[in-house]
């Protein structure tokens, strides 16, 4: 199963933390991502996207049955963000790499050319999207079209519910809509990572997206 | 007057980067006030803000009761916020969970959107009690009209079964039906569930073999195939006939698939199921190794990594096939990527046999030499090593101490495995151990010391050579002076002194050894080493005196007197040493 999902930026600030295994103590919710960030940010360009973590000893921190064997970190770097999945031996490593790509594409479809600030201002939406992909540490859906459809449904339902509760409001307040949250900075879009077709072709030819 | 929404909180945070802590404390105060109010919108907004702050490290659990309030709202957009906070904050030990049973039951029979929320939340915080209460309901929901819900129920059952194992036999019949669900993603989730569960009790899932086999031969979805193969890998050791049946489809897959992830799983299952063994397994094994070696030479680091992992699994069964690719593997040792290097290390340590042990160990040692930042003069006994030092380029990447320690440990492990079955020449092994001291630049002192002692005590024949090497060690001032520097491995002097003392029969020049054992600079050494030194000095002295007494002549008397005097002088210095052991000596 997948034990944790993190998104953090190149300075180490967490943008999303999701644990699917119970933690030994609450302060681990920040220390684990920090440790992983240190490891991941010191990787040279072109290195493979997998890391074993014997020295991190995550198994005890995550309260995992040790006989369940090793934990592996699968990560990808897109623009200013690191997407990190912590998985155990039950998951295929290359499959997880694909899954990260699926996650990012779903984000892209939901936010229309997603960038880091979208993740900051709409972190609840990001959680909702992740929930359409992984539930309880197991993969729920891998097809981007299907995921986006469910995300869209959920978004519409929330909007409808909000409108019903606040008939006089404009799009603002708790929901905030899918807008960019009023930032004026120009931010790097994540779509520099290639379209699905291009990525798939590259994969078959044995090259890496990044 | 600020508007208390998530957006404003975030904007405020970004504006107040300098006094962030203070800003957040104020925000939390604000949140505390808001959750106590009656307005559900306000409450939910506050919880959402707090959930955001939870990600930054601020405790959310004080608001647990309020979270439940928000979860029980009938309005979908508020309920979502409640469940999100719950999944971030609750664990199976949260006591307010007792209040959620009815809420969950209500949500589970409500609109599909609510059901999805409840199932997702359940997967995060289900307790044994909740699991027990909801099993029946969840089992019924396996036949829900919507595929999306069926998927979620299947996956939620994983956590439920973990908390309440009796749920499995209860739900198993329906779950088995789900393997033939018309919707492919439901089937996929079911396979996923079984794959996870089978890691604990594989035999229980043998009954699933027929439908799984059907999926294996008809599906083209790589995700599903990977899980199915993994599942077969878990259950086939318990059913030999299954292994025979699987051989064909798996061979087929290996030959046709372009997805290396699937290839790796097939190889893994072949190994686990014993399909690569014996003469019948040879063509399949050859096929696997050929495919894998292709990936090893690929530029893509990820493919290299996976290929190596698979090779490691094959080595115990078909070492000869893997040995054909030894050169590539040794090259990977120099890869700049530590993950690849670790895999290469794994491979090499499992490839070692008594024939290639010397060669492989030399390779690893020269690799370590390149790894050291400076090349020092090495008084080593191994000639190939000195050749490597001369030729060592300065372009090698700097390796961490932990990595070097790992390499050194592997070398020792490779040689000492199974009572040294891989070592033919113990003299050579002793010199290797010494080289490690000088080359590793990491704290290998204790493991080398252990090995030295072990080998010397067990293997009589090498004792003479050992004593020769040890005197060389004793001779090395750098080791003594470097007592505080762990990379110098001074700890090994303990072994050196002890060996010289114990087997002083083999000392070619006992007087010289004696001198080395009592020189003033040994005061720099840690106390336990000093005590061994003193003890050995006494042994050597007595041995030498005995030797002398066999051919006594008067002119030797002044010599003896001077030596004894020097030794006594040496000892005097330590009479008042801080450590009791030393004093005792």
Image (cartoon, helix red, strand yellow):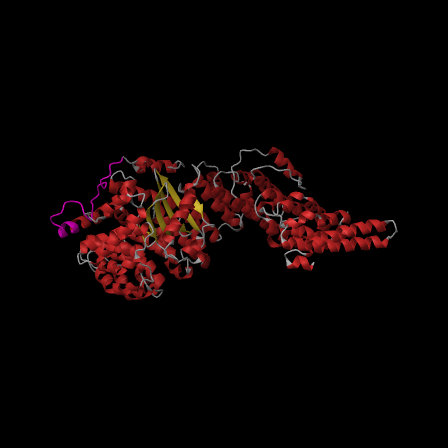
Whether residue B335 appears in this view of the structure is yes
Residue A145 can be seen, yes or no: no
Residue A193: x percent and y percent? 33, 36
Displayed quadrant of residue B538: bottom right
Judged by its main secondary structure, the magenta piece is loop
**Residue toward you, A140 or B581:** B581
**Is B53 rendered above or below residue A77?**
below
Tell me which segment is drawn in magenta: A161-185
Residue B442 place in picture, x, y as percent? 56, 45
Q: Assess whether residue B47 is covered by the magenta stretch.
A: no
Residue at position x 37%, y 46% in the image: A84
Q: Nearer the viewer, residue B394 or B241?
A: B394
Q: Position of residue B266 (x, y in %)?
A: 43, 48
Foreground of the two, B480 or B390: B480
Quadrant hosting residue B372: top right
- For the C terminus of chain A, the quadrant is top left
């Amino acid at each position: 199963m997948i034990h944790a999902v993190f998104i953090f930026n190149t300075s180490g600030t967490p943008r999303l933390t999701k644990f699917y295994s119970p933690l030994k103590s609450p302060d681990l919710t920040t220390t684990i991502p920090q440790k992983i960030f240190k490891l991941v940010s010191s990787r040279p360009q072109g290195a493979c996207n997998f890391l074993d973590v014997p020295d991190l000893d995550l198994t005890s921190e995550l309260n995992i049955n040790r006989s369940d064997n090793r934990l592996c970190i699968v990560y990808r770097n897109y623009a200013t963000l690191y997407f990190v999945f912590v998985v155990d031996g039950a998951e295929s490593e290359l499959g997880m790499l694909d899954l990260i790509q699926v996650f990012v594409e779903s984000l892209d479809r939901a936010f229309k050319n997603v960038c880091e600030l979208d993740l900051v201002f709409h972190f609840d939406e990001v959680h909702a999207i992740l929930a359409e992909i992984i539930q309880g540490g197991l993969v729920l859906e891998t097809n981007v079209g299907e995921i986006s459809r469910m995300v869209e449904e959920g978004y519409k339902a929330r909007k409808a519910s909000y409108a019903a509760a606040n008939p006089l409001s404009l799009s603002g307040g708790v929901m905030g809509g899918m807008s960019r949250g009023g930032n004026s900075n120009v931010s790097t879009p994540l779509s520099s990572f290639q379209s699905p077709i291009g990525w798939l072709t590259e994969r078959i030819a044995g090259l890496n997206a990044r | 007057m600020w508007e208390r929404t998530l957006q404003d909180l975030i904007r405020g945070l970004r504006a107040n980067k300098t006094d962030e802590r203070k800003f957040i404390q104020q925000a939390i105060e604000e949140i505390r006030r808001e959750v106590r109010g009656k307005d559900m919108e306000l409450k939910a907004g506050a919880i959402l803000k707090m959930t955001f702050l939870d990600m930054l490290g601020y405790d959310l659990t004080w608001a647990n009761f309020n979270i439940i309030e928000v979860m029980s709202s009938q309005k979908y957009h508020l309920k979502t916020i409640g469940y999100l906070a719950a999944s971030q904050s609750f664990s199976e030990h949260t006591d307010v969970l007792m209040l959620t049973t009815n809420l969950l039951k209500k949500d589970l029979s409500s609109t599909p959107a609510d059901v999805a929320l409840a199932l997702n939340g359940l997967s995060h915080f289900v307790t044994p009690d909740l699991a027990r209460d909801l099993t029946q309901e969840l089992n019924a929901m396996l036949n829900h009209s919507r595929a999306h819900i069926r998927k979620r129920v299947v996956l939620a059952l994983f956590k439920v079964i973990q908390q309440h194992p009796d749920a499995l036999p209860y739900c198993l019949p329906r779950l088995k039906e789900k393997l033939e669900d018309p919707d492919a993603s439901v089937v996929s989730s079911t396979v996923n569930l079984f794959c996870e569960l089978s890691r604990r009790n594989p035999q229980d899932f043998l009954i699933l073999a027929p439908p799984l086999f059907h999926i294996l031969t008809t599906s083209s979805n790589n995700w599903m195939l990977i899980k199915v193969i993994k599942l077969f890998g878990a259950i086939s050791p318990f059913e030999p006939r299954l292994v025979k049946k699987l051989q064909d489809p798996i061979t087929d897959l290996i030959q046709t698939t372009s997805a290396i992830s699937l290839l790796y799983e097939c190889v893994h299952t072949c190994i686990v199921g014993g399909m690569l063994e014996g003469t019948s397994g040879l063509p399949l094994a050859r096929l696997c190794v050929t495919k894998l070696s292709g990936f090893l030479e690929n530029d893509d680091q990820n493919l290299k990594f996976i290929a190596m992992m698979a090779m490691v699994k094959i080595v115990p069964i078909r070492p000869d096939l893997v040995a054909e690719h030894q050169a590539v593997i040794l090259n990977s040792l120099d890869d700049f990527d530590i993950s690849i290097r670790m895999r290469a290390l794994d491979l090499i340590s499992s490839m070692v046999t008594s024939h290639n042990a010397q060669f492989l160990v030399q390779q690893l040692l020269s690799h370590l030499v390149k790894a050291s930042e400076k090349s020092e003069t090495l008084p080593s006994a191994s000639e190939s090593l000195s050749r490597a030092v001369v030729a060592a380029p300065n372009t090698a990447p700097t390796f961490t101490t932990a990595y070097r320690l790992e390499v050194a440990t592997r070398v020792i492990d490779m040689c000492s495995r199974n009572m040294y079955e891989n070592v033919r020449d113990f003299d050579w092994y002793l010199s290797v151990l010494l080289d490690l001291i000088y080359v590793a630049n990491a704290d290998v002192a204790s493991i080398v010391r252990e090995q030295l002692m072990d080998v010397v005590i067990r293997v009589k024949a090498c004792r003479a050579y050992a004593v020769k090497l040890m005197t060389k060690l004793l001779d090395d001032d750098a080791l003594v002076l470097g007592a505080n520097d762990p990379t110098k491995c001074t700890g090994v002097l303990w072994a050196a002194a002890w060996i010289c003392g114990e087997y002083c029969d083999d000392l070619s020049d006992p007087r010289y050894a004696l001198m080395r054992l009592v020189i003033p600079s040994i005061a720099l050494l840690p106390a336990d080493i000093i005590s061994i030194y003193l003890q050995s000095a006494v042994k050597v002295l007595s041995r030498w005196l005995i030797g002398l007494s066999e051919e006594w002549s008067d002119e030797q008397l002044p010599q003896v007197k001077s030596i004894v005097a020097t030794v006594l002088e040496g000892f005097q210095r330590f009479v008042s040493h801080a450590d009791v052991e030393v004093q005792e000596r």
